[in-house]
């Protein structure tokens, strides 16, 4: 069945193209008016909803509305995240939903870095989230996303791996970060980075003492300490349409129609941790600069959001 | 394309002496060195060496076919072990760069397979893969809208920009960036970065990479010219 666009702008009848038959023309007709089919501006990000921590009646989620000028927050109770994990977070960026669970385990440190622990991220795109993923081993997109998250963690030093060491050369923490997509509507890299950062802020590691006589580790599950987060990372993804138009936070449909993707990861000191553009049509210097400035504004918005939610979760506990 | 005996010896080298800003290691390239693939090339940057082979346009599986374009598949094989997550991410970068410069719409419902075998890794691996890929695609005679080359820049701990770093220089660097530059507009096709850096440093590295790319494109021209002048 054809999906005729529901327009809120008085466009002439000739521009009412069919969304399923000619998706490119449909999107172009909106881009000509400097807007998009869901009503957003070209540089506007979708509504971000964040939920940190375990299920509890006091658990709240903060929703940020109208990011372009004033960000005001709506608080409403909703489903919690994972109670069996050491840290967890659920992020919804429009329809894209990513849940992150962090499990901490004890392990032997690697021979090359005896005084450091390690972080192992894994992005999973199951068949649940979209019909384009089939069951079986992870596809290229999931593996590339996992490598991207691993590089971002390493580049930015969001957690000093020396903090994860317990006994030099013998025992360290390894953090398994599992990011699972529940609903794929484009821009999973941004959502993954937000979910990861929020889950790391929520992670509480138990105290470990080494028994002097038996030299066996003793884990005290009651006493827990938080992780030291050094950098506040936020990523902003863009895609290029028709080699010239730049749009922020693409949906799945916009991603398939675009000619190039770009993801910029910034931290609170305005330093870039990653400029990830895996091929596609070329990008001029001015466009790149535009993306970087939009990414820094986005960083401030998301930092406020995560701090607010983390603070409200702490108050509720 | 069946290479004749004298084609095989079309091996050209270029030493770029360091100017104040851009210095690249010794380059080497050989084309049509393998007999089975439709196009093949070997690219050497200092000690880093990558061999590329291209098969196509050939038949494509119905599940993978695209109705109006060719399907490009890239495989990166490391020197030791099976391909891991890191190789998948490199494959994605190389594939999307090639898709931007190849005229895929000329071969609908066909498959193009590009295989990159890492022979030795001494730094700047991704850019060496991109260079080998471009030379192999040229050797296969596939229609392209522009050529592309890969340049790696490393920012050392004291803020100096080093182009085409060795593995030792990469390890000591604070940030590492790889760019794919196209030959038509000298703009950035692909960007892959590690480590943290400022916006100013990024722009400086892009400028340095664009300057280095001119030298690499000149090397491509010399290499192909030498190869065809020796035939027959």
Image: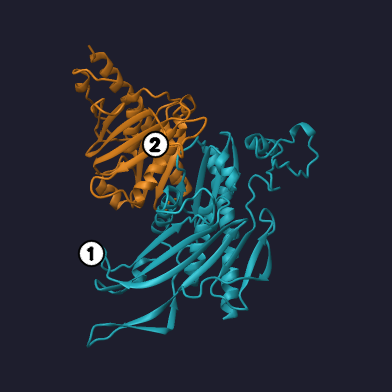
Chain colours: A cyan, B orange
Residue A250 lies, in percent from the top left, at: 59, 47
Who's the residue at 62% across and 52% down the image?
Answer: A45
Who's the residue at 48% across and 28% down the image?
Answer: B108
Q: Is residue A268 visible?
A: no
The answer to whether residue A315 is left or right of residue B66 is right
Based on the displayed image, in which of its 4 quarters is residue A241 positioned?
top right
Residue A284 lies, in percent from the top left, at: 52, 36
Residue B209 lies, in percent from the top left, at: 39, 36
Q: Residue furthest bottom?
A: A213
Using the image, determine if residue A48 lies above or below residue A314. Answer: above
Q: Quadrant of the N terminus of chain A?
A: top right
Q: Secondary structure at mark 2?
A: helix
Q: Badge 1 is on which residue? A: A111
Structural distance between the alpha carbons of marks 1 and 2: 36 Å
Based on the displayed image, in which of its 4 quarters is residue A169 positioned?
bottom left
- Nearer to us in this view, B45 or A203: A203
Q: Badge 2 is on which residue? A: B209
Residue A128 lies, in percent from the top left, at: 53, 57
Q: Is residue B20 visible?
A: yes
The answer to whether residue A72 is left or right of residue B136 is right
Q: Secondary structure at mark 1?
A: loop
């Amino acid at each position: 069945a054809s999906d005729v666009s529901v327009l809120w702008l008085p466009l002439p009848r000739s521009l009412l193209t069919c969304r399923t038959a000619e998706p490119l023309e449909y999107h172009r007709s909106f881009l000509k008016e400097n807007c998009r089919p869901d009503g957003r501006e070209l540089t506007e990000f979708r509504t971000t909803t964040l939920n940190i921590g375990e299920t509890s009646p006091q658990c709240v989620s903060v929703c940020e509305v109208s990011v372009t000028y004033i960000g005001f927050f709506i608080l409403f109770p909703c489903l919690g995240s994972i109670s069996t994990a050491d840290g967890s977070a659920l992020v919804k960026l429009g329809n894209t939903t990513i849940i992150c669970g962090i499990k901490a385990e004890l392990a032997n440190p690697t021979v090359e870095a005896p005084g450091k622990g390690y972080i192992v991220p894994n992005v999973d795109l199951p068949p649940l989230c979209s019909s384009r993923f089939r069951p079986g081993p992870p596809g290229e997109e999931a593996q590339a996303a996992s490598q991207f998250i691993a590089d971002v963690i390493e580049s930015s030093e969001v957690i000093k791996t020396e903090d994860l060491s317990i006994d030099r050369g013998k025992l360290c923490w390894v953090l398994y970060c599992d990011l699972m997509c529940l609903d794929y509507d484009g821009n999973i890299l941004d959502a993954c980075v937000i979910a990861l950062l929020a889950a790391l802020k929520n992670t509480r590691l138990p105290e470990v003492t080494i028994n002097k006589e038996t030299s066996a580790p003793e884990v005290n599950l009651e006493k827990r300490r938080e992780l030291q987060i050094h950098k506040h990372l936020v990523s902003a993804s863009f895609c290029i349409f028709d080699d010239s138009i730049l749009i922020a936070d693409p949906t799945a449909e916009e991603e398939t129609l675009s000619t190039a993707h770009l993801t910029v990861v910034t931290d609170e000191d305005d330093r870039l941790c990653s400029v990830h553009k895996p091929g596609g049509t070329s990008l001029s210097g001015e466009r790149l600069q535009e993306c970087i400035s939009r990414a820094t504004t986005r960083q401030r918005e998301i930092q406020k959001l995560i701090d607010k939610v983390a603070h409200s979760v702490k108050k509720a506990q | 394309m069946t290479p004749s005996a004298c084609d095989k010896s079309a091996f050209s080298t270029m030493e770029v002496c360091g100017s104040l800003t851009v210095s690249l290691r010794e380059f080497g390239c050989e084309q049509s060195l393998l007999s089975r693939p439709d196009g093949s090339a070997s690219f050497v940057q200092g000690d880093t060496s990558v061999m590329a082979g291209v098969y196509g346009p050939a038949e494509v599986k119905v599940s993978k076919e695209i109705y109006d374009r060719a399907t490009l598949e890239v495989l990166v094989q490391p020197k030791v072990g099976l391909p891991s997550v890191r190789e998948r991410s490199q494959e994605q970068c190389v594939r999307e760069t090639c898709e931007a410069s190849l005229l895929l719409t000329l071969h609908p419902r066909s498959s193009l397979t590009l295989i990159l075998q890492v022979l030795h890794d001494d730094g700047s691996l991704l850019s060496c893969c991109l260079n080998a890929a471009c030379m192999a695609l040229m050797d296969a005679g596939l229609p392209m809208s522009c050529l592309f080359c890969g340049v790696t820049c490393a920012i050392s701990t004291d803020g100096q920009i080093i182009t085409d770093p060795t593995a030792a220089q990469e390890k000591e660097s604070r940030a590492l960036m790889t760019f794919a530059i196209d030959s038509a507009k000298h703009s950035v096709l692909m960007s892959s970065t590690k480590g943290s850096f400022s916006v100013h440093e990024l722009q400086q590295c892009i400028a340095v990479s664009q300057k280095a790319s001119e030298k690499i494109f000149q090397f491509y021209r010399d290499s192909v010219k030498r190869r065809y002048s020796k035939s027959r």
